[in-house]
Image (tube, rainbow, N blue to C red):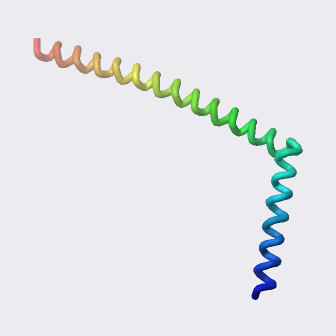
Amino acid sequence: MAIDAAVIGIVVTVLFALMALAYRSGSLSKDVEQNKSNINTLFDKFSDYQKENKSDHREIMLKIDRLNNHKAN
């Protein structure tokens, strides 16, 4: 049992070391930077859609107000 745990610990440590080396070598850092860029782009698009939806909502509310005023007259 103790040997199994020791082997698992060594394997996990080696895997983390390999991941750290890969990140430092640049192969993973490029992917990370690309993902950050993609996330920023998606956030910007989402913000733009929110602004458009707010303006659409205002237009719809104005039309409803006009219709209600027209019915009242």
The count of marks equals 0
Quarter that holds the N terminus = bottom right
**Above or below, comparing residue 13 to residue 71 in the picture:** below
Determine the image quadrant of residue 44. Answer: top right
- Tell which residue pokes out farthest to the bottom in this image: 1
Q: Which residue is drawn at 81% across and 84% down?
A: 3
Q: Which residue is drawn at 23% across and 14% down?
A: 66
Indicate left or right for 36 with 53 as reference: right
**Above or below, comparing residue 25 to residue 8 in the picture:** above
- Tell which residue pokes out farthest to the left in this image: 73
Foreground residue among 73 and 49: 49
Q: Residue at x 40, y 23 (%)?
A: 54
Indicate left or right for 15 with 58 as reference: right
- Tell which residue pokes out farthest to the right in this image: 25
Quarter that holds the C terminus = top left
Indicate left or right for 19 with 38 as reference: right
**Above or below, comparing residue 40 to residue 19 in the picture:** above
Q: Point out residue 69 in the picture as x, y percentages from the top left corner.
A: 16, 14
Q: Residue at x 63, y 31 (%)?
A: 40
Determine the image quadrant of residue 53. Answer: top left
Q: Point out residue 49 in the picture as x, y percentages from the top left corner.
A: 50, 27
Foreground residue among 30 and 15: 15
